[in-house]
Amino acid sequence: APFAAARRPGAVEARRRYSWSRRTSFPRPVVGAAGSSRQDVLLSRQGVACQAAMVAVVARREGPVVASGTFAVNFFIVTWVSSMVMPGVAVYLAVWRSWLFLPLMIGLISGLAYVPWIRRVDFLAEACFKGVQSAVPRHEVVVEEGGAPSSGRPRLYAVHPHGIFTLGWATLFVSELMRDCTFCFAAGLFYSPGFRLFSRLTGRPASATKGSVKSLLSAGKHIALIPGGFEEATLTERGVDRVFLQHRAGFLKYCLEAGADVCPIYAFGEVDFYDNLQGAWRWRLWLNSQLRLPGVVFWGRRWFPLAPRIDGSGLVVVVGPPVDLGPRRPNPTPDDVAAAHATYVAALTALFDRHKAYAYGPVRGKNATLHVV
């Protein structure tokens, strides 16, 4: 009987239409009272459970203090990464998933991120500082004489190295020492709503665009910048002190134009927190220069990739004294910029050599070398 039915006129066409419809139709999600599908709720619960389980493992192995610090660092990382894709996620959820709650929350965050009267909240900044402090085995901020922000000429604090997630930079950003200093972030990150709101509540953020940096220095402000940028992050290698500075002199030109001093800052141990895949430099550096994306392939602890490793020397952030680049030059020549670059590289290298034994210990510090590429 089945074979006879299959041979009836039109049966083959019917089977073809049925198989095509099965391949191309998608089940509509079952939407609950909160506007979210059951699949979405299950996935979100699984994600939260996974994060909680990982933090519980950290607490069991290394204690509650390190676990709380690990959670704080991961919160910072997730905020940073998720903020970049917030607008796209909002459109996807609203149009394709009929899920309105999260898009509305993203819209609210986006609005708050641009409210002009939002300022730093001290207890949030202190909580973030303590979070980074408890996530690593050793955490210090060393300030050489004259390195602290003060009245007078504007200063540009140049922070090295970038590392993977710039924990040294984050430490300074939320510290009481640098509360009056404006930190210049990559434009794509600064204008993303979630991170913009978070950074405004914990410090003084700004964009690292040319116009923004020049405007702040001309106004006499102290600013902080990572000259190596995403290229320095891409070149990160665990245990190797490397800065991308050979062809970075624009920030020194801005200092000459504004009559500002430049203060070198080095975060010892920044390169020890994450492993980073080496190789394919041409393609990865193309991502940096053309798409403004970090070309990093990283992992931290074996069972918690986002968590920084704690088997290194810890984090020692050293703030050096200001380097006087001479009088203000509204139109510096290429020779002026080259001379300022040589002076700065020498000052940064001297700062590294003065503190490497203290930060890394006598064994590693004896052979540690700062590679300028």
Image (cartoon, rainbow, N blue to C red):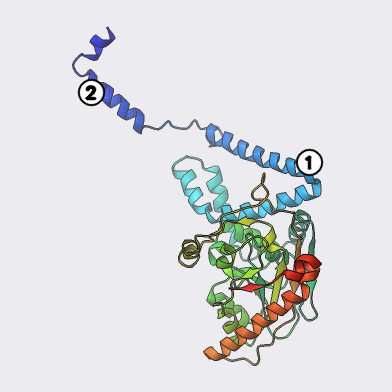
Residue drawn at the location 67% of the way across and 82% of the way down: 346
Would you name the residue on which mark 2 appears?
A: 13
Foreground pick, 180 / 263? 263
Describe the element under mark 2 as helix, strand or loop.
Answer: helix
Q: Residues within 10 Å of mark 1 (few under 14, many from 20)?
A: few
**Horizontal side, residue 183 vs residue 39: left or right:** right
User: What residue is at 28 percent from the left and 10 percent from the top?
Assistant: 2
Q: Is residue 134 above or below residue 255?
A: above
User: Distance from label 2 to label 1 (Cα)?
Assistant: 62 Å
User: Between 138 and 372, which is closer to the camera in this rendering?
Assistant: 372
Q: Which quarter of the rendered picture does the N terminus lie within?
A: top left
Q: Residue at x 79, y 46 (%)?
A: 62
Residue 79 appears in the rendering = yes
According to the picture, the residue beneath numbered tag 1 turns out to be 60
Please tell me whether residue 152 is drawn above or below residue 310 in the rendered image. below
Closer to viewer: mark 2 or mark 1: 1
Farthest residue toward the left?
9
The amino acid at mark 1 is: Arg
- Quick check: 331 left or right of 1? right
Q: Quadrant of the C terminus?
A: bottom right
Q: Which percent across, then down, holds residue 244?
A: 59, 72
Residue that sits furthest to the top in the current view:
1
In this image, 224 relative to 111: left or right? right
Q: Position of residue 314 (x, y in %)?
A: 76, 60
Which type of secondary structure does the marked residue at label 1 adopt? Answer: helix
- The kind of residue tagged 2 is Glu
Disc 2 to disc 1: CB gap under 8 Å: no
Quick check: can you spot residue 186?
A: no
> What x and y, as percent, mark residue 196?
60, 61
